[in-house]
Amino acid sequence: MRASLFITCYNDTLFPETGRAVVTLLERLSVEVEFRPGQTCCGQMHANTGFRGEAFSQARRLVRMYQDAEAVVIPSSSCVAMIRDQYPGLFEELGNEELRMQFAAMLPRVYELSEFLVDKLGVEDVGAYFPHKVTYHASCHGLRGLHLGDRPMRLLAKVRGLELAPLPNLDRCCGFGGTFSVKNGDVSSAMLAVKLEDVLGTRAEFCTALDNSCLMHLGGAMHRQFAPMKTIHMAQILASTQSQPAEVLA
Amino acid sequence: MSAVVEHSLTDRPVLDPALAPPFPVAALPVLRNPQLRKNVAHAIDVIQAKRAHLVAEKTDWQELRAAASAIKDEALAHLDAYLTQFEGRCTTAGGVVHWAADAAEARRIILEILREEKADEVIKIKTMTSAEIQLNPYLEAAGVRTYETDLAEIILQLGEDEPSHIVVPALHVNRSQVREIFARKMGLPDLSDEPKLLTAAARNYLRQKFLSVPTAISGANFLIAETGAVVIVESEGNGRMCLTLPRTMITLAGIEKVLPRFQDLEVMLQLLARSATGERMSPYTSLWTGVTPGDGPQKFHVVLLDNGRSSILASKKERQTLRCIRCAACMNACPVYRQTGGHAYGSVYPGPIGAILTPQLEHLRHAQSLPFASSLCGACYEVCPVKINIPEILIDLRAQVTDQERKTVGKFFDPMYVGLRAANVIFSRAWMFHAAQRMGRMGLKLFTRKDGWIHSLPSVGGKWTQTRDLRGLPKETFHQWWKDRGQSSKGAREHGSEAR
Amino acid sequence: MSSVADSRRQVLDRIRAATQNSAATVEQVAGAYEALPRGYVRHGTMTVRARQERFIERLREYDAEVVECATEELAATIAAQLAASGRQKFVAPAALPAEWLAAGFDWKIDRGLAASDVEQCEGVLTACFCGVAESGTIVLHHSETEGRRVITLLPDWHLCVVRASQIVETLPEYFDKCSEQGSEGAREQRSREQGSGELPRLVTWISGPSATADIEMTRIKGVHGPRFLHVVVVEDRDQGLGTRD
C-alpha cells in the first residue's frame, strides 16, 4: 500500500509534528508514504470566504497533482470535506469535462486519516500507547461533513493507557469556522467560551481532534487562560508508543 | 415608569435589512448582555432536547425528509400550475385570491380589503410574512389598529420589541420582563411572574377582542393546490379564534407555501411540529377551504405574495431555500444563533435560514454580512426537515457578495481581501508558498514571546488574539523535515520499499 | 382593478421564466408528482389493542384525560364525566345521539348559535372523525356530530367520544381514510356529512388541550382554546357494531 500524504497548508506551516506523526504511524502499519513537494492548499479558505475563482484554481491544482495517487491521506477533516463537498460544485461551474473526469476518478481514493485507518487498512488497534486522560472533540466537518461516526472513538479505545473522558455537547461547534473567527471575531469568541467550558470540564490532560484548525482555536484559548490542558492531533496520539512517546509541545 | 418606556424604545432592534447594522456589529449588544444570552440559550436548549427525543422516535425520519424535500421541489418546479390550481379551487370554494408582486402591493391590497370592510381594527395570527412586509406599522399609520394574538407576539407588541425567532418570537424575554410589560400595558400592577398567571392575563386581555373584532389576518403554513385549502399550525388556539369567529378573514401567504395535494400533509405535519416545538403534532392544526356556510368567516381573501421569491426560484442552487416550512429547527441548532439570538440578523428571518433567505429577498442589495454569519458547522442542514443545504447556499452567497465587493475600492485595500489575493498567488507555486512560510516565520518572530506563543497581533490578526493566543511558527515546516529526512535516509528507505 | 390582473400575470410570468416552464396544468405534471419518493411508513404494525393503548398514552402525555368504556356503558360514562367536570351548561352538535345528552344538565344544541351564546357554555360534547394513535391526535371534520368549529373552541372543557374502530395508528392511515370516503361502502355513511368522494373542507387536528411555551419554554396548558380535553374511548369492536364509520 502506497499512500500519498497531503499535509495541507496550515499543518505544513503550523503543525509539522502532526505530519511527522502521520508518517510514523503509517510506516509502522507498513504503508509506504510519499510526499509530493509541489503541494500547497486545497482552496478551502478561499472557497469559504467567497473567492470562488481562486478556490477553483487551487482545487484544479490539487486534482492534477494527485490524480494518479494510489491513496491520498489527509490529516484534516475540513480539507477532506472541502474536496468532497465543494469540488464537485466548483468543477461543475468553472471546470471542464476532463477535469471533472479526473476528479471523479480520484475522489474514492481520498481519505481522511481515520477513514484510511479504519476503512482502507481495516485496523483499529494501531499499537499506540498514550497513558493520559484525553477528551475527543468531534470537528463539525468530520462529524457532519464526512460522517466519521465512531471511527475516531474506536481508534482511541484501542490506545493502551489512554483514558477517554467523554465530552458533553459533542456535536457543538467550537466557533472557529476559518475566516469566521476573525470576520465575526466576537461571536466566534463567545462560541469558543461555551465550548471551552465543556472541554475543560472533562478535566482531561489533552483535547484531541482530527482537525488542527479546531485545536488551534481551542488551544489558543487554553494558553491564554493558563488552562491545565493541551491540544494534540489524534495522529500524534496514534503514533505514540512506549519507546517513542508523542512529541508534545509545551 | 416613563424611563422604562423610553429605554425599550431606544433599544428596539432594527429588523429592516435596509437599515440594520452588519451582523458582527448588531451582535455586540447581545454578546454583552448575559441575561439575554441566558434566555436564548435556555429556550433553544429546551426545544432542542425535546426535538431530539421525538425525532429519534421516528424510524422513518430520513424517508420523511426525503419525501418532504421532493414534494417541495415538485411544487416549486411547477409552481405556476399549482398556484393557478389553488386559485381556481379556492375561488370555487368562495374565497377571493389576490396576487401581490411585492410588499407594497400586498400592503395596499390588504388595506383596500379592510377599507371595504370598514375595519378600524384587526386581530392577527402570528405571521412572519406580515412582519416581512412590515404590515403592522403600515396599517397603524392608515388608522387600523392591529392586535397580535399569539402570546409571544403580544409580549413583543406591548413591549415594543421585535421578534427574535420565527416560532418562539419572544424567547429572548424572560418571565420577569413579561411581567413588567403586562403589568404596565394591561394595567395589572399586582401581576405575578408565574408563566401560568401571565398566560391567563393574556387570555383575559384578548378574549373580548376575539369575540368582537370582525376582521382577522393570518399567514399560512400550507396552501393545498388540489382543494384550495389553507392550513395553519398553532398551539394556543388564538389561530382558531381568528379563523373561526370573525366575519372576514385575510390570509397572506408566500407563493412558496403551496403543496400539490391534500395528502402531502401526511408528510409535512409529521415533520413540522417535531422540528419546530418538539411535539408530535402541535395542539391545533386547522384546515379550511374558502367559505363554509354557517361555519367561520363568510368572506375569505388570500393574498399570494412574491416579494423576491420568484427570483430565488430562478437560481438552481438557491431554489431549495424556498422549501423552507419555517420550523426554526436550524436556528435552534445553530451555535451562532445560540450566542447572538435573532435580532442581530436584522431581519424577521433570523438564524441560518435567515442568513440565506434575507439577502436573497433583498436581491443582495442589503444584508450582505449575513452569509458570513456562520461557522459552516452544518448543524442546520442536519436538522432541516426539508433538507435545505444551508451551508452550500451560504458559501454560494458569500461568493456573490465577494464578487460584488471586490469591485469596490474600499474592499480592494481591505486587509483580508489583500491577504486572500496574495494567498492565491502564493498557493499557485510551491516555491512561493515556501518563501511565504519563511517570511511569515520571520515576521511573526517579532510578535512571538519567549514562551513560543503570540499574544497580540495587529490588524485582522488582532481579532484572533483578542481572546486566543497563537503558537509561534515552528522552526521547521513539514516539507522541510521531509526533505531533510529523505536526504539522510534515502538509501535505506528505497531499499525498504523494494522489499515490500 | 387592472393592476391586480397585471400583478397576477407578472408573478406568473416571473415564475414561468424562473422555472423555464410554459403555462402548465397540474394534469400535465401529474407524472412528475406520482413519481415522488414515498419511502416513509404508511401503515402501522400494531395490534388493535396496542394501537388503542398507544392512542391513550399519547393523549395523556399531552395532558388530556382519557377513560375507556364499552358501548353499552357510553351514556353512563358520558354522564359521569359531565358530572365530574363540575359544570352545568354544555353545548352539543345537532346530530349527536340523544342518549349522549345526559339528563340533569343544561344543553344547548347548536343550530347556528351566536358566538356569544356558545361563549356562555362551560363545556362541549362531540364525536370525532378519527383518532391517530401515534401522535395522540383527534381529528374533527366538523360534521353534524362533530359540530361547527366554534363550539369546540370557546367552551373551556371539551369531551370527545372516540370509538375504538375510529383509531388509526399512523397519520398516513388517516389520509388513506379520507380518500376512502369516496369508495362505495363509505359513501353512504359519509355523504350526509361531507358529500361523497370529497376531501374534507374543514379539518381540525387536536393534539392535547391548547398550550403555550412562549414564556421561558414552560409548557402552560390552556390559553385560548379549551383548557381541558377529555376523551372517552368506546370499545366498539367486539360488539360488531359496524366496522368503520
Image (spheres, helix red, strand yellow):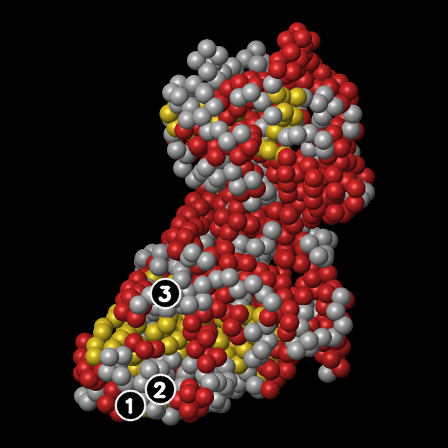
Q: Indicate whether B345 appears above or below A199.
A: below
Find disc 2 in the rendering and name its residue. C145
Q: Locate the C terminus of chain B and report the quarter of the image it occupies.
A: top right
Circles 1 and 2: CB atoms closer than 8 Å: yes
Q: Amino acid at mark 3?
A: Thr
C193 or A151: nearer the eye?
A151
Would residue A14 be seen by someone viewing this image from the given angle? no
Percent x, y of residue B379: 53, 46
Find disc 1 in the rendering and name its residue. C97
In terms of image quadrants, where is residue C194? bottom left
- Same subunit: marks 1 and 2: yes
Q: Label 2 lies in what chain?
A: C
Q: Secondary structure at mark 2?
A: loop
Residue drawn 59% across and 65% down? Answer: C36
A129 or A214: nearer the eye?
A129
Q: Secondary structure at mark 1?
A: loop
